[in-house]
Amino acid sequence: MLEITDLRKVYEDGTVAVDGLCLSVKAGEIFVLLGANGAGKTSTIMLILGFTEPTAGCVTLNGVDVQKDPLTAKKHVAYVSENVTLYGNFTARQNLEFFTNLTGRTNVTEEEYRAAFLRVGLAENAFHRRVSGFSKGMRQRLGIAIAILKNSELIVLDEPTSGLDPKGGFEFLEIISQLKAEDKAILMSSHDIFRAKAIADRIGIMRNGQIIEILDKERIKTADLEKIYIECMKEITAGATSAKVQ
Ligand SMILES: Nc1ncnc2c1ncn2[C@@H]1O[C@H](COP(=O)(O)OP(=O)(O)OP(=O)(O)O)[C@@H](O)[C@H]1O
Ligand SMILES: [Mg+2]
């Protein structure tokens, strides 16, 4: 579903944010990118979504090259950011319609809106309430309802559980697991080793724009993930941050 080949991103100031990254995520798989601040997770996600141009390498979604055919590629991916952008003065229902229309779907029935809303665990009586009064967890849920309505094969989430309380975080991951069961491919970034371990089929540990270690399900279950992560980060604590091209 998602194929990333030799992806590289050097920002204008010379920061190398993504450095020769290769990765594939299949339908029905949850891949979690773990990494410290500045490791390049968000930059990788921005490249997958076609929000920024790669310096080299390519991303394909269902075989469609994000750079060569961005409009078609974007149909295959839904995005949930850390702070979901919503209109506070609109109701949940109005936000669902507005953002779903933006994705190009205009034939959504009232029943579908309501079903997506309830599916993410939001209470029926909040459907017609203004989003300005929603908690962070409710906004995240609404963000994933919008992603569900887009009905794309790949869902990309950038730190979706950051700032959620433990129960909210747990429930959010349950929704992600259900989407996996529906054969969605899921790529998620996180700082949370505990939750990554609970949900991931594979975990990629990212440092300085590279995935330096990939753990499969078996290793995730048996290995001391925290220890592996700390080992991987050791060089950073020695003072290294993202490289710069001079
Ligand atoms: N627009 C930009 N221009 C220049 N440098 C940038 C830009 N965006 C990110 N960077 C740099 O690229 C590197 C990777 O940043 P990125 O935001 O991708 O990391 P991250 O893994 O998402 O970090 P975090 O966990 O803090 O969200 C960092 O050194 C960052 O300062
Ligand atoms: Mg980030």
Image (tube, rainbow, N blue to C red):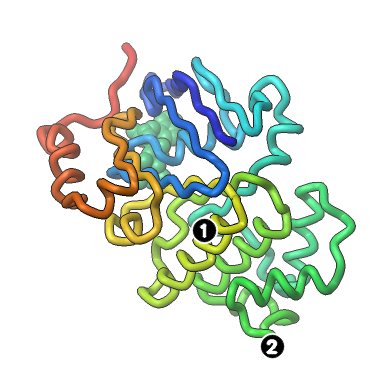
At 10% across and 33% down in the image, what residue appears? 238
Which is more toward the observer, 150 or 198? 198
- Estimate the spatial distance between the alpha carbons at disc 2 and disc 1, rounded to whole Å: 23 Å
Residue 96 lies, in percent from the top left, at 74, 65
Q: Secondary structure at mark 1?
A: loop
The reply, left or right, for residue 196 in relation to residue 42 is left
Q: Quadrant of ligand 1?
A: top left
At 13% across and 40% down in the image, what residue appears? 231
The residue identified by callout 1 is 83
In the picture, which quadrant includes the N terminus?
top right
- 2 or 1: tag closer to the N-terminus: 1
In the image, farthest residue toward the right: 107
The residue identified by callout 2 is 125
For marks 2 and 1, give the one nearer the viewer: 2
Is 6 situated above or below 218?
above
At 56% across and 34% down in the image, what residue appears? 2
At 82% across and 47% down in the image, what residue appears? 104
Is 224 situated above or below 52?
below
Q: Amino acid at mark 2?
A: Asn
